[in-house]
Amino acid sequence: MDDKLQEWLAREREVMAMEEKAGCGVSRADQVAGKSGLQMMQGLLQGELPYPPIMRTLDYHLVEVGDGLAIFQGTPGPAHFNPMGGIHGGWYSTLLDSALGCAVHTKMPAGRAYTTAELSVNIVKAIGPKVQRVRAEGKVIHCGRQLATAEARLYGPDGTLYAHATTTCLVFELK
């Protein structure tokens, strides 16, 4: 596990350097015009487009993208505690939702977009205080003209599964 965690932390440092280059914010229309969803996600990862503020707020980063794939890495901590001192279920859900949505985003051609219509999250194990990082890996199952579905897993560097999720997204033409 230590080797895997060190590998994850090294990747996180690389990504944070790219994020620093682009800054935090929302991409302007002229920055994304004519780009496919995969090109936009790659632009985020390469520091060509600003990273979304939610990533700073909830302490997670996009660490990998591919065709139908998005992987985020998060740092669970005291800022994410629920009233009982555990990691809030909303943190699990948001991290998984980001991986699911961005995986779907990679399948969008220029001029097409999506929105989440349904999100289902199953938390199967609490993230304890010794867990330094988790990854949410989202993969597209189906992407059609009107609907897309994806699944994601939230796991630790030792392979422990903490949660899994599915989504259904509505796909539409941008106007």
Image: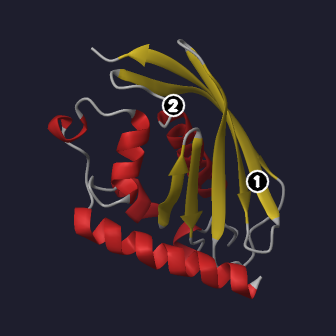
Q: Secondary structure at mark 1?
A: strand
Q: Residue 78 in the image: x percent, y percent?
A: 57, 76
- Mark 2 or 1: in front is 2
Q: Residue 88 in the image: x percent, y percent?
A: 64, 60
Number of residues whose C-alpha sits closer than 10 Å to that of mark 2, classed few (under 14), some (14–19) or many (20 or more): many
Quadrant holding the C terminus: top left
Q: Earlier in the sequence, mark 2 or mark 1?
A: 2
Per the rendering, the mark at residue 163 is 1
Per the rendering, the mark at residue 107 is 2
Whether residue 86 sits left or right of residue 49 in the image: it is: right
Q: Judge whether 81 appears above or below 10 on screen.
A: above
Quadrant holding the N terminus: bottom right
- Inspect the image, locate mark 2, and give the three-letter code of the amino acid beneath it: Lys
Whether residue 123 sits left or right of residue 43 in the image: it is: right
Q: Can you see residue 52? A: no
Number of residues whose C-alpha sits closer than 10 Å to that of mark 1, classed few (under 14), some (14–19) or many (20 or more): many
Q: Judge whether 78 appears above or below 28 on screen.
A: below
Identify which residue is drawn at 33% across, 51% down. 43
Identify which residue is drawn at 49% across, 37% down. 106
Whether residue 74 sits left or right of residue 86 in the image: it is: left
- Inspect the image, locate mark 1, and give the three-letter code of the amino acid beneath it: Ala
Do residues under tags 2 and 1 come within 8 Å of each other at their CB atoms? Answer: no
Q: Secondary structure at mark 2?
A: loop
* Frontmost residue, 8 versus 98: 8
Q: Residue 34 in the image: x percent, y percent?
A: 26, 29
